[in-house]
Image: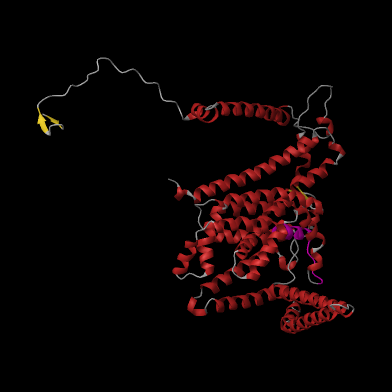
Amino acid sequence: MAYQPEYGVMSETIPPVFVRQELVGERPAPVKTTGLVGFLRTRLFNSPTNILITIVSAMLLWFIIVPAVKFLLIDAVWTGSDRTACIAKNAGDVIGACWPFIQAKFSQFIYGFYPEAERWRVNLVFVLSAILLLPLLIPRLPAKGLNASLFFVAFPVVAFFLLYGGGLRGFGLSWTAGLLSGFNDSIGDSGRKLAAAGATTAVIGPLLWLLGKLIVLVATMVSWLLLPLTWLHDQVQSFGRPVWVDFVLTAIIVSALTFWLSGGTRAGWRPLANCLAIFAGIGIVIAVMGLDRGGLPVVDTRLWGGLLVTLVVSVVGIVASMPVGIALALGRRSTIPLIRIFSIAFIEFWRGVPLITVLFFATYMLPLFVPTGFTIDGLMRALIGIALFAGAYQAEVIRGGLAAIPRGQGEAASALGLSWAKTTGLIVMPQALRHVIPGLVNSFIALFKDTSLVSIVALFDLLGQLRAAFSDPVWATPTTLFTGFAFTGIIYFAFCFGMSRYSLFVENRLNAHRRN
């Protein structure tokens, strides 16, 4: 039975059926899109333009990589004690890289002029940094909070006393009293100078004189408020071992304030226990390193150099610039005009000057702005300048991430009753930082390479030590220059490539939920 629509009835007529008498021809095999052949066919030779680009790129790589491999490995000199090993004996001989030069100057490239007997301290800092950093970079390892606290808080203090040496002449109360007293004296001197200048000026003299007198009055009132702290500082110094007395008093005061500000017994004893545990750890470090007895021999930062200075400047700059950048990015988006104007002015000022100018300013002009009797080490000045300079750039990167967060995120947090601080710290900022990981790492890599500019202010980083090694006549050969720059280039590439690959890993891991 078959249905015939033109009549609307069923019919017994069977429609004709086509039956093929021969086999269908074989279809061509599908194009292979996997493996090496598939990669070449789909990525490199899938169009005339790509074929041309592939050939040109292969020729460029051939003319670059092959001579580099021949210079660095095949024609290189591997053994020798002076320049004679890296000089051609006969005309026409090809001499490649002079690796004995690197072997002879290797310790100088790593430690600079750091005393050889004290280099174990640098090695210990490198080992401690690796032990604390590697678990922090592996996502599946536990205790990330404790690990981060040790790396970002405890390790810098330990590394400072290991690298620089010296001991403690006081603790929290002594430092606070000395810093506030010096700062107050500096303000008082500035006020007196301003009043004296106003007394000799005709146009705006009265205004300057009044401002100077007001500053002197404020400094005098602050000095009266500091009298109890100064008296307590003098009493502590009268003991035989003032470090421990000052340490105990500081621990008691800070622990009591922490316990009171956290809500007292209503919030439990955990904040007090954590604070006491932190001070106990600090005390153990002071006792083990002998900081109360003078500590290790002092090694001036002018003797530091090589990879040590490069890592110190880059790591401190990267770590210190992040909170500066976050604060400036939030300040630029603030609704309070004073904070917003200050953040904008700060960012535009530091972005508008080159890093060399910042280093010169930090090295030669920063001491003019510190309190009387307070000195800042040359390396510390460069670190402050680099941190502020990098923080201005990080602020714009982070602000881009904040702008990418929908307003509904903050509105939903406000509807749940979260404060601005919790909304920013728990909801907005984590999403913003996840969006700008490539930009942040790009800034980190640029900062790591820009550390070579510290040689302008008499700090010998890796490249600075390399230039100093070139002046040694014992290794003056035609290939020494290229060998040294190839060696430092490999080191810079290893660190920068490692940061870029780890950032890609973190980005893929954080964005795994977005994959289709």
Residue at the extreme front of the image, as rendered:
6
Q: Residue at x 54, y 60 (%)?
A: 429
Between 503 and 416, which is closer to the camera in this rendering?
A: 416
Q: Quadrant of residue 387?
A: bottom right
Between 49 and 31, which is closer to the camera in this rendering?
A: 49
Q: Residue at x 79, y 68 (%)?
A: 369
Point out residue 189 in the picture as x, y percentages from the top left corner. Answer: 83, 76
> From the viewer's perspective, is 510 left or right of 470?
left
Q: Residue at x 71, y 54 (%)?
A: 313
Q: Which residues are magenta?
A: 372-387
Q: Tell me if I can see residue 63 in this picture.
A: yes
**Picture layout, residue 278 above or below residue 454:** below
Q: Tell me if I can see residue 241 in this picture.
A: no
Q: Main secondary structure of the magenta part?
A: helix
Point out residue 401 in the picture as x, y percentages from the top left corner. Answer: 56, 56
Point out residue 479 in the picture as x, y percentages from the top left corner. Answer: 80, 33
Point out residue 440 in the picture as x, y percentages from the top left corner. Answer: 61, 52
Magenta stretch: residue 14 in it? Answer: no
Badge count? 0
**Picture layout, residue 447 above or below residue 38:** below
- Quarter of the figure with the C terminus: top left
Between 44 and 312, which is closer to the camera in this rendering?
A: 44
- Quarter of the figure with the N terminus: top left
Magenta stretch: residue 378 in it? Answer: yes
The scheme the figure's colours follow is secondary structure
Q: Quadrant of residue 61?
A: top right
